[in-house]
């Protein structure tokens, strides 16, 4: 995986937790940021580059769509592999894996080249869990598990066979599928108003998007009494959480920082 946004790590940790719950100590599961932990500069700065790009939508959009054509991203990965293959191979072999699960579109090409060059591609199960619900990048696809029918259609359009595609949804931690206490008790625990409807705002692990503007738009100052409440998940965006907490809201807002 790679820490480009919070979703990839969360998905990886969810898969690890499920392995531990289902199989106990039968499997050792390691989660590693391949680019940060097993490449040199400038390649190990991928996460920081991502955090910069997503702050400027035109730059991110240009970078994303410029790399969509196969001739572009395949030649790019071929060139990149020449610089990082040895260190990445050392990192992969350190774990002596029986299964490699990628939850990131940039965690496919170089590892597959390495496994193929070492003649062990057929000995190690390599699969991809796509963590984008709809507008996934074409670099996501190999033998993969899709989170939605839309992603499966995109995989078919990219030339993959139906036998290579499984739609399972996004991986979630086991705690999310277990029974929780009643809504009334949860609202008390979160210090929410019991009678007001609630809106949940989320911007991923980095707290991206127009979250603050949306929250302010929902806080209609012309109303005498609150007609709802907003819960805002800020992820790792501490500045966003601080700005929201500094506002004297008419409607209750829970700013969550993880």
Image (cartoon, helix red, strand yellow):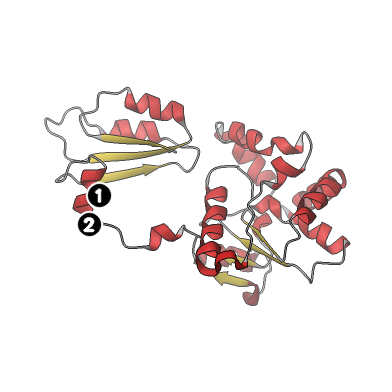
Q: Residue at x 66, y 46 (%)?
A: 33
Badge 1 marks a residue whose secondary structure is helix
Q: Quick check: marks 2 and 1 in contact, CB under 8 Å?
A: yes
Question: Is any atom of residue 110 visible in this view?
Answer: no
Quadrant into which the C terminus falls: top left
Question: Depth check: 3 or 51 in front?
Answer: 3
**Which quarter of the figure has residue 160?**
bottom right
Tell me the crowding category of disc 1: few under 14, some 14 to 19, or many 20 or more residues within 10 angstroms, Cα based: few
Q: Is residue 156 above or below residue 133?
A: below
In the picture provided, is 243 more to the left or to the right than 94?
left
Question: Depth check: 6 or 149 in front?
Answer: 6
Q: Residue at x 38, y 31 (%)?
A: 212
Q: Residue at x 58, y 54 (%)?
A: 136
Per the rendering, the mark at residue 115 is: none
In the picture provided, is 118 more to the left or to the right than 226?
right
Most extreme residue toward the left is 224
In the picture provided, is 90 more to the left or to the right than 46?
right
Q: Is residue 131 above or below residue 6?
A: below
* Residue 177 coordinates in the image, percent (x, y): 39, 62
Residue at image mark 1: 186
Most extreme residue toward the bottom is 163
* Residue 250 coordinates in the image, percent (x, y): 20, 29
Residue at image mark 2: 182
Question: Is any atom of residue 178 visible in this view?
Answer: yes
């Amino acid at each position: 995986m790679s820490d480009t946004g919070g979703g990839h790590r969360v998905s990886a940790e969810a898969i690890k937790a499920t392995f531990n719950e289902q199989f106990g100590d039968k499997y050792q599961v390691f989660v590693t940021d391949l680019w940060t932990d097993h490449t040199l500069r400038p390649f190990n700065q991928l996460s920081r580059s991502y955090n910069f790009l997503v702050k400027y939508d035109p730059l991110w959009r240009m970078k994303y769509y410029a790399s969509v054509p196969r001739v572009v991203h395949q030649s790019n990965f071929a060139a990149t592999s020449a610089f990082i293959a040895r260190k990445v191979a050392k990192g992969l072999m350190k774990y002596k894996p029986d299964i490699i699960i990628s939850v990131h579109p940039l965690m496919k090409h170089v590892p597959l080249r390495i496994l193929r060059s070492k003649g062990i591609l057929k000995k190690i199960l390599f699969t991809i869990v796509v963590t984008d619900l709809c507008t996934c990048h074409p670099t996501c696809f190999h033998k993969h598990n899709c989170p939605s029918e839309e992603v499966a259609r995109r995989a078919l359009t990219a030339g993959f066979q139906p036998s290579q595609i499984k739609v399972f949804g996004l991986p979630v931690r086991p705690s999310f599928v277990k029974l929780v206490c009643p809504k009334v008790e949860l609202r008390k625990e979160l210090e929410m108003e019991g009678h007001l409807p609630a809106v949940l705002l989320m911007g991923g692990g980095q707290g991206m998007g127009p979250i603050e503007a949306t929250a302010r738009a929902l806080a209609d100052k012309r109303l005498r009494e609150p007609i709802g409440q907003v819960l805002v998940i800020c992820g790792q965006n501490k500045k966003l959480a601080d700005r929201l907490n500094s506002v004297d809201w008419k409607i209750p807002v829970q700013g969550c920082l993880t």
